Amino acid sequence: MAVARRELLLRVHSYRLRREDLEDCYSQATYELVAHARRGGAFASGAHLANVLEQRFVSRVHDRRRALAGRSPIQATLERARPIDAAAEQPLQVIDERADLETLVIRRHDLGRVRVLAERLTPDQRLVLATQVGLQMDCVTFCNRFGWSSEKYRKVAQRARARLRELMAIDEGRVPPEGPGRISA
């Protein structure tokens, strides 16, 4: 039965996977049925056996498609991988899909500088900036919590941003820039 149905099922489901993957799925389904029969399992008729074979095959095809779609990270990675022999035909170009590496490095560097330079702000300025950036707290909530007027909050925030910009500009001109473990002049 497995030999008789093989080509038909592979042809019918050829749009779902590559031929090699379909053959793997068919082999798995056939192996499961052989193992079932060896354990004493029986089928009511040839038609029943053919239906069970197709059902198991389609189930394996669906499993394989889910794995390739990302449920299995290793399968998804292997599916997108290029064969090594293809690299010999043309130069292999590695593409980082996350972000431009230079931009990512610059942003991380700037963030580290902000953390170090923020220590030179007044405690009130650091508090306002930390609640704006870290907690994303609005003016009304901040003023209610800390007993400030909205005008004081606005002025402290404005001065904190201006002072931090000024410190970043000064630090930008230093070689090497200040950072953890660096001596300040």
Image: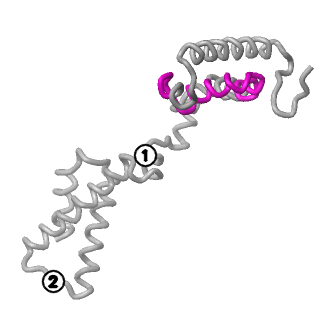
- Asked which colour scheme the image uses, the reply is one colour
- Where residue 153 appears, x then y in whole percent? 58, 18
Question: What segment carries the magenta color?
Answer: 114-141
Quarter assignment of residue 116: top right
Three-letter amino acid code of the residue under disc 2 = Ala
Work out whether residue 136 or residue 37 is closer to the camera in this orientation and state it. Answer: 136
Quarter assignment of residue 131: top right
Q: Main secondary structure of the magenta part?
A: helix
Q: Which residue is mark 1?
A: 79
Residue closest to the far bottom: 40
Asked if the magenta segment contains residue 139, the reply would be yes
Q: Residue at x 62, y 23 (%)?
A: 103
Q: Secondary structure at mark 2?
A: loop
Answer yes or no: is residue 32 visible. yes
Q: Which residue is mark 2?
A: 42
- Where residue 88 appears, x then y in whole percent? 58, 36
Q: Secondary structure at mark 1?
A: helix
Work out whether residue 136 or residue 52 is closer to the camera in this orientation and state it. Answer: 136
Q: Residue at x 67, y 11 (%)?
A: 162
Q: Residues within 10 Å of mark 2 (few under 14, many from 20)?
A: few
- Where residue 102 appears, x then y in whole percent? 65, 24
Q: Which quadrant holds the C terminus?
A: top right
Q: Residues within 10 Å of mark 1 (few under 14, many from 20)?
A: few
Asked if the magenta segment contains residue 146, the reply would be no
> Tags 1 and 2 in contact by the CB under 8 Å rule?
no
Three-letter amino acid code of the residue under disc 1 = Glu
